[in-house]
Amino acid sequence: KFSIPEARLVAVKVSSSPKPPIGPPVDVAGQVVGPDGKPLAQIKVLGIPKTWPNNFYRQEALSATTDAQGQFRFDKFAPGGRQYAFLLTVVAEGYTLVSDYQVVSDGTRKPPITLQVQSGQPVTFVVKQANGQPAASVEISPANRTVDARTTHLQYAMHRKDTAKPTNAQGEVSFTCWLPGETGEVYFRHQDQEGELKFKVGDDRRVTLTLP
């Protein structure tokens, strides 16, 4: 309760629940393995840490490279004792796109993450302009890979610079991120246009995309 004085200035004390103490920064680490479960060296792992400092949302783009044992580590990934989330993504030539997204409500360090890729064959994208002509020099980057109704692997747009390829004079560019029968999306950037395009991979591994 309060009363309004003539000066029309009111001070109200607001109680709030105490926040848990901030602990030392937590690391996020793991291993990339191939279809046979053996470690893969020199694979780039893309990391997106998500934090909420002072009730503001923040995320950034990081990357790490696996060592001879296929292991990677992101040091000081997030403040300890506070909720954080992470997305780890692998987009590597010769393998399918794979990712792992987790929310850590209690702010503790998670056990090492295993990212297992599958062998992939090139999927050729044929990018065309609205008039049907080949679209050259279009920047294409994987956005997601949907395996089934319960499994979708992601790459955020913040990492487009790490995985983008330009189309050639015939409007073609290839990635090994998807298998036949899977659906997905790619980011595209061309002149003053950018966005996402959906598709499904057929048995011939050729996909035609038309720019809006």
Image (cartoon, grey):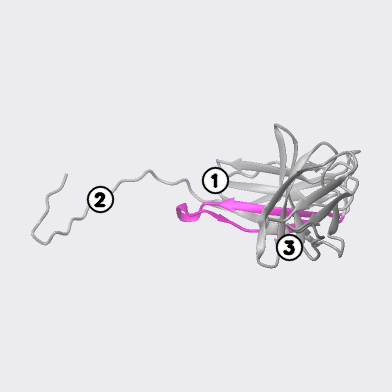
Secondary structure of the residue carrying tag 2 is loop
| Residue at image coords 23%, 51% | 12
- Residue 44: percent from left, percent from top: 80, 56
Magenta stretch: includes residue 53: yes
Q: Nearer the viewer, residue 113 or 154?
A: 154
Q: Which residue does the numbered mark 3 point to in the structure image?
A: 161
Query: Which residue is most to the top?
Result: 149
Q: Is residue 169 visible?
A: yes
| Residue type, label 1 | Gln
Q: Nearer the viewer, residue 203 or 4?
A: 203
Magenta-highlighted residues: 42-67
Secondary structure of the residue carrying tag 1 is loop
Q: Which residue does the numbered mark 2 point to in the structure image?
A: 13
Q: Earlier in the sequence, mark 3 or mark 2?
A: 2
The residue mark sitting in front, 3 or 1, is 3
Q: Nearer the viewer, residue 137 or 64?
A: 137
Q: Which residue does the numbered mark 1 point to in the structure image?
A: 83
Is residue 183 toward the left or the right of residue 17 in the image? Answer: right
Query: Where's the C terminus, which quadrant?
Result: bottom right
The residue mark sitting in front, 3 or 2, is 3
- Residue 192: percent from left, percent from top: 66, 66
Disc 1 to disc 2, how far (Cα)?
27 Å
| Residue at image coords 71%, 62% | 189
- Pointer 2: residues within 10 angstroms few (<14), some, or many (20+)? few
Question: Badges 3 and 1: C-beta atoms under 8 Å apart?
Answer: no
Q: Which mark is residue 109?
A: none
| Residue type, label 3 | Lys
